[in-house]
Amino acid sequence: MCDACGCSSQESTEQSLQDKVKDTIEAIRGGLQSHGGDVELVGIDEDNTVRVRLQGACQGCPGATMTMKMGIERILREKVPEIKEVVAVD
């Protein structure tokens, strides 16, 4: 372990909450894009509530709530258990 590359630092080996959320959103983005939609990470609140913005065909879609809760939120909470909830913002 050395100080030059930071490999001795525990923080460098663990992803931040924001990085984990971003990586997970990138992983599920392809499925949404294949149907003309998309999702953008807006931010993460202090209580670990993730705020996202649905875009494209997802915006205003009658099934958007189902996509949010049964798709995006479920997957994010499986991959990043620290998350309290996922909410859509305009």
Image: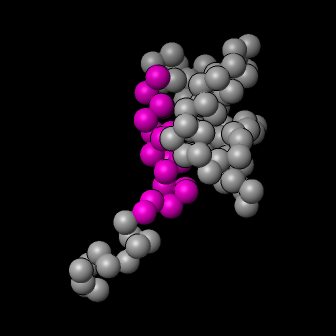
Magenta highlight: main SS: helix
Q: Is residue 23 magenta?
A: yes
Is residue 90 found left or right of 38 in the rendered image?
right
Q: Kindly identify the residue that appears in the image at 50 percent across and 61 percent down.
A: 16
Q: Is residue 59 visible?
A: no
The N terminus lies in quadrant: bottom left
Q: Kindly identify the residue that appears in the image at 55 percent across and 37 percent down.
A: 78
Task: From this view, report whether residue 66 is shown above or below residue 26.
Answer: above
Q: Which of 68 and 53 is in front in this view?
A: 68
Is residue 71 found left or right of 29 in the rendered image?
right
The part of the chain drawn in magenta is: 14-31
Is residue 72 found left or right of 90 in the rendered image?
left
How far across and how far down the image is residue 44, in percent? Answer: 66, 54
Task: From this view, report whether residue 86 is shown above or below residue 55.
Answer: below
Q: Is residue 34 visible?
A: yes
Residue 15 location, quadrant: bottom left
The C terminus lies in quadrant: top right
Residue 86 location, quadrant: top right
Q: Kindly identify the residue that appears in the image at 73 percent across and 61 percent down.
A: 46
How far across and how far down the image is residue 69, in percent? Answer: 68, 27
How far across and how far down the image is residue 49, in percent? Answer: 71, 49
Work out which residue is located at the far bottom of the displayed protein and give it: 3
Q: Does the magenta stretch include residue 5?
A: no
Q: How many marks do you count on the picture?
A: 0
Display coloring: one colour
Q: Kindly identify the residue that appears in the image at 61 percent across and 19 percent down.
A: 57
Task: From this view, report whether residue 80 is shown above or below residue 10.
Answer: above
Q: Which of 32 and 79 is in front in this view?
A: 79
Task: From this view, report whether residue 29 is shown above or below residue 20.
Answer: above
